[in-house]
């Protein structure tokens, strides 16, 4: 036990000093970060910069040493980041105003270049947003609105991604993906007219269905009548003369035998009537 | 468990003699019977003093002695040595705390050694080097999270035939790779949400409206799931989409009436067809009935044509004439006046003139 060890205050101070020295010379770089070391504010080297296809555990994450007050560490995110572009009005070639809600996912693959050109992640994002906007507008402004809603959309987005990549490369950024989250007709006349079109299309459909129903009903009825006629003919054609007689008898009954019309009809019979043949006693 | 072992270790450090106290409890774990809980870390003051209750606690005593730099009984650490012991105790607790990791059955622990990924812990009690050398990020991989869309209101999407559909759906996801999940994407949940919206809209944009609000649900769900998974794998997110479920797919509320009208029209058409079918059944049944009737009569007629015919004739006449009002028989040569119009009107007295003929 040396003398200074016996003095607790000295001990505490010593520990604190050691910690401060340690903390200012060693920094731990996690897997999610890359570091640009600035020596006297000049870029000196990078640590744990992104390399494609590296597996976790084989990266350069870990402790990094620096000279206190000489080296400054700039931390840069290594993960996939996103820049959002909500409600971007785009005018297609057929003069349809669409509201596009798009986003880009990107990764900073060259942290040194990023730090030199823009400095921080926030400023990078502020730079990328207008770039995404202009790429999107350029690409979508060349298209008909129907393209944005068709299977071709994937191709359109690839084009946007490529043009954004060209612009973003200067910042050491790799664009992972550009996507449209939403394509909306802006509220107001385009949306209303689309809804109206839907409604009229439906009304038309309703009318068609009704007419079709009536048509079907008519056909069903006619078919049934034809079938009935066939049945009648098949039966009555066996003896048309007898049918004539038999049907006449039926007809008389129907005409004169209405139960509600009792005693209303008058019939005048001549004695020569077949029915009265026997009545007159003629032989 | 961590606690108690740490405490034991520490109290062992201090526990040079059996502690004595005025209220008799010999345990080093505080018992709040009379004098309030005792600090288990403190060494009970030795018999050098016998203080009544309410005098400075053991911890104050400790402070006093630490400052005084001696004056305790032999065997009781003082001064710097006491400080070292306290420090050692704290470090021991720290080590125990940060090197034992209970990982739950649905969790994984992502271990980093000085920042670098060094492996994944499976469920159970796991040991690592203490912080700051090895840090463990516990990720709940078994828990299936659900994202609902939209958050509120209508969620209008454009369909392939330029129509608009109102869609509400949910996405269930969990974590396939804990390390990817922790290291690869900055905002996992936002990423899932953005991906889901994008993929779902892309799928709907290739779907016809009638399919979207009718038969095509399961197809849309499956396609959206595949599309989402593809995008998330591109990001290397370590996220797995368990399923997409459409809760509602309907026409926007503004055109709801028009859609209802279609349903009504379908009902109407159907009822028209049903009526026609009923009529058809009736007509055909009547025809068959009549035909059968005629056939039966005709069979009889063929057996005895004349007789049957006469019989039918007389029967009919009987019935008909019995039911009619008057029968006027005109004898030959007699002209009878009949006020026919009056007759037809039926208000004239029916003058029945029966001119008897030969008797």
Image: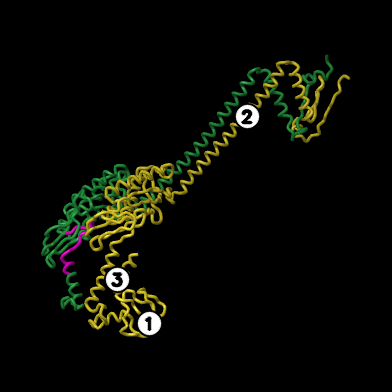
Chain colours: A green, B yellow
Numbered badge on residue B22: 1
Q: Is residue A265 above or below residue A191?
A: above
Residue A229 x %, y %: 60, 25
The residues colored magenta run A20-35
Quick check: marks 3 and 2 in contact, CB under 8 Å?
no
Foreground mark, 3 or 2? 3
The quadrant in which the N terminus of chain B is found is bottom left
Residue found at x 28% / y 46%: A93
Residue B82 x %, y %: 24, 76
Foreground mark, 1 or 2? 1
On screen, residue B331 versus residue B47, left or right, reads: right
Chain name for mark 2: B
Numbered badge on residue A33: none
Q: Is residue B101 visible?
A: yes
User: Between residues B287 and B237, which one lies in front from this camera angle?
Assistant: B237
Say which label, 3 or 1, has the lower sequence index: 3
On screen, residue A269 versus residue B253, left or right, reads: right
Numbered badge on residue B285: 2
């Amino acid at each position: 036990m040396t003398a200074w060890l016996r003095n607790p205050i000295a001990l505490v101070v010593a520990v604190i000093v050691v910690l401060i020295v340690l903390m200012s010379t060693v920094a731990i770089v996690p897997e999610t970060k890359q570091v640009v070391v600035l020596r006297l504010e000049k870029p000196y080297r990078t640590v744990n910069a992104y390399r494609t296809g590296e597996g976790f555990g084989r990266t350069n994450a870990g402790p990094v040493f620096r000279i206190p007050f000489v080296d400054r560490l700039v931390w840069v995110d290594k993960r996939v980041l996103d820049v959002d572009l909500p409600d971007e009005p785009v005018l297609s070639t057929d003069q349809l105003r669409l509201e596009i809600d798009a986003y880009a996912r990107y990764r900073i693959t060259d942290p040194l270049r990023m730090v030199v050109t823009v400095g921080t992640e926030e400023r990078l994002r502020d730079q990328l947003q207008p770039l995404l906007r202009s790429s999107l507008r350029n690409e979508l402004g060349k298209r008909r609105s129907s393209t944005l809603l068709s299977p071709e959309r994937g191709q359109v987005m690839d084009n946007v991604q490529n043009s954004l990549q060209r612009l973003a490369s200067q910042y050491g950024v790799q664009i992972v993906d550009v996507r449209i989250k939403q394509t909306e007709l802006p509220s107001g006349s385009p949306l209303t007219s689309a809804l109206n079109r839907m409604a009229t299309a439906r009304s038309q459909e309703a009318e068609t269905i009704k007419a079709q129903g009536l048509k079907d009903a008519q056909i069903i009825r006619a078919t049934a009548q034809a079938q009935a006629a066939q049945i009648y003919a098949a039966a009555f054609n066996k003896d048309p003369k007898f049918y004539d007689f038999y049907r006449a008898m039926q007809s008389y009954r129907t005409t004169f035998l209405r139960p509600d019309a009792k005693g209303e009809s008058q019939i005048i019979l001549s004695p020569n009537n077949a029915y009265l043949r026997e009545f007159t006693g003629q032989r | 468990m961590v606690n108690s072992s740490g405490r034991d270790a520490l109290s062992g450090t201090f526990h040079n003699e059996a502690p004595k106290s005025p209220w008799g409890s010999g345990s080093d774990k505080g018992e709040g019977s009379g004098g309030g809980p005792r600090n288990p870390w403190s060494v009970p003051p030795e018999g050098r003093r016998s203080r009544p209750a309410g005098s400075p606690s053991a911890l104050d005593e400790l402070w006093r002695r630490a400052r005084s730099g001696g004056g305790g009984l032999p065997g009781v650490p003082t001064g710097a040595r006491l400080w070292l012991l306290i420090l050692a105790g704290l470090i021991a607790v720290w080590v125990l705390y940060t090197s034992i990791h209970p990982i739950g059955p649905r969790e994984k622990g992502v271990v980093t050694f000085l920042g670098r990924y060094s492996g994944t812990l499976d469920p159970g009690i796991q040991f690592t080097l203490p912080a700051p050398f090895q840090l463990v990020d516990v990720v709940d991989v078994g828990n299936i999270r659900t994202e609902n869309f939209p958050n509120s209101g209508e969620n209008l999407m454009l369909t392939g035939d330029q129509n608009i559909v109102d869609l509400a759906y949910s996405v269930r996801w969990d974590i396939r790779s804990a390390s990817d999940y922790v290291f690869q994407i900055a905002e996992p949940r936002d990423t899932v949400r953005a991906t889901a919206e994008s993929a779902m809209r892309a799928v709907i944009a290739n779907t016809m409206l009638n399919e979207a609000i009718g038969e095509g649900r399961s197809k849309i769900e499956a396609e959206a799931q595949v599309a989402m998974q593809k995008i998330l794998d591109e990001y290397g997110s370590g996220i797995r989409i368990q399923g997409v479920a459409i809760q509602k797919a309907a026409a926007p509320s503004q055109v709801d009436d028009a859609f209802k009208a279609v349903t009504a029209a379908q009902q109407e058409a159907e009822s028209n067809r049903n009526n026609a079918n009923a009529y058809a059944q009736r007509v055909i049944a009547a025809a068959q009935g009549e035909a059968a009737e005629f056939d039966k009569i005709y069979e009889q007629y063929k057996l005895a044509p004349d007789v049957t015919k006469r019989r039918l004739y007389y029967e009919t006449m009987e019935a008909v004439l019995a039911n009619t009002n008057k029968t006027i028989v005109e004898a030959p040569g007699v002209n009878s006046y009949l006020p026919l119009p009056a007759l037809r009107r039926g208000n004239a007295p029916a003058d029945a003139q029966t001119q008897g003929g030969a008797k």
